[in-house]
Image (spheres, rainbow, N blue to C red):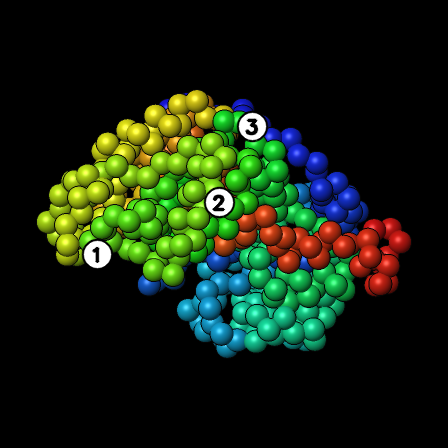
Amino acid sequence: MIRKNNVNPVPVKDIFNKFSIEEINIKGKRVFIRADFNVPLDDNLRITDDRRIRSTLPTINYAIDEGAKVILSSHLGRPKGKADPRLSLAPIAKRLQRLLNKEVIFSPDCISSQVEGLVSKMKEGDVLLLENLRYQPGEENNDEEFARALARLADVFVNDAFGTSHREHASIVGVPKFLPSAAGFLLKKEIQYLRGLVENPVRPFVAILGGAKVSGKINVLENLVDKVDKVIIGGGIAYTFIKAMGYEVGNSLVEEDMLETAQRIRRKLKGVGIKFYLPVDCVIAQSIEPAAETKIIPTLEIPKGWRALDIGPASVKLFSEALHDAKTVLWNGPMGVFEIDAFSRGTFAIAHAVADAYALTIVGGGDTDFAVHRAGVSDAISFISTGGGASLQLLEGKELPGLAVLANREDLIRRTPVDSTL
Ligand code: AMP
């Protein structure tokens, strides 16, 4: 396994120079940090994976060290505007306490006179965690009054919730309208890697896309047309491309309404000399079940009634060889139904191939992140994004609402009364 921790991201103009947390004097200030602590919990409400909490620690520790009064906030799950004890942030307060090795005060609400009381008693370096923001309907509705109430708790807003920055929610786009605002370290790092990838990748640049939804990946391909050198398509989305070329794919996943688009994109990429790889063989079964009978067959010979659920060994070899000269690799989307062992080999083999590539390797969030961890190669990946939807949106070349609002910070400062020491 090649360690690539010394591989730097592509240098890009640091858009955060003016509005990074380091540019604001936060000593003694009440700093409202919007984090993404949306972690998985088991039936006993135990956190099964705390990476999202850990990834915000640099920002939290920095704020503590600078002597800020640190107010943390996040959503968890989808309580739909009502209190749901199963989606309380209380277990997160406990985990944070262990990770920070200091007391974390837990506020049983995010706006109330009780919260205001707790905040007013905070001293420099104290940490307070607010209850689930989505217990309040105003969060997802981006209600101005709710945003104003959150803003009243603090002097400064810091966004470190990359995974939620594509959402126009009150704590992402509303609160920064009322406070001087800045980006935390995680948000900066995400943008630096992902923007670097779409703006100025070191070439050859190979993009590997998989997963289930063609529609979610097409815009990424469109945006990368003049940046990428090779495109590898695996996972369920491959069969829409293959069917669009006029071949039978049995019962494999196909997005009928994307057939024309898939064919157009493939032609467009090939037309400008980009190498386009599809699976040459696949693992098929008649149903998506752990005990289903499986066969490995050439992709163009999928029989009626069978469906392709993983790439086969010849595809793994072909795709891995395509990575040999890569200097930049982006991987988003599993190569098969990797949640089931019988269809997981292709995804794990590609995880190893990406980890072994001597390149800047960037893995999109969500399932691919999980696959890389399950394969045990996460340490050998240059950067693993913490946001699925948000990272795709950036790779599509779209602005994230949570970022756009920070970019207007100077304007915001003019519109809101700000302490001159900030
Ligand atoms: P996405 O969110 O689009 O990245 O899709 C991830 C999902 O794609 C995973 O849950 C996989 O089980 C699924 N997937 C990957 N390959 C296939 C396939 N060949 N057929 C059906 N589903 C697939």
Q: Is residue 237 above or below residue 377?
A: below
The residue closer to the viewer here, 338 or 325, is 325
Q: Which residue is mark 3?
A: 202
Q: How far is mark 3 from mark 1, CA to CA?
A: 39 Å
Q: Is residue 138 left or right of residue 232?
A: right
Q: Which residue is mark 2?
A: 221
Q: In which quarter of the view is residue 408 placed?
A: bottom right
| Extreme-right residue of the structure | 420
Q: How far is mark 1 from mark 2, CA to CA?
A: 25 Å
Task: Confirm or deny contact between disc 3 and disc 1 (CB under 8 A).
Answer: no
**Secondary element at image label 2:** helix
Tag 3: Cα neighbours inside 10 Å, few (<14), some, or many (≥20)?
A: some
Judge: label 1 CB < 8 Å from ligand 1.
no
Q: Is residue 310 left or right of residue 150?
A: left
Q: Earlier in the sequence, mark 1 or mark 2?
A: 2
Tag 2: Cα neighbours inside 10 Å, few (<14), some, or many (≥20)?
A: many
Q: Is residue 187 above or below residue 9?
A: below
- Give amino acid for label 1: Asn
Q: Which residue is mark 1?
A: 251
Tag 1: Cα neighbours inside 10 Å, few (<14), some, or many (≥20)?
A: some
- Give amino acid for label 3: Val
Q: How far is mark 3 from mark 2, CA to CA?
A: 17 Å
Q: Is residue 316 left or right of residue 194?
A: left
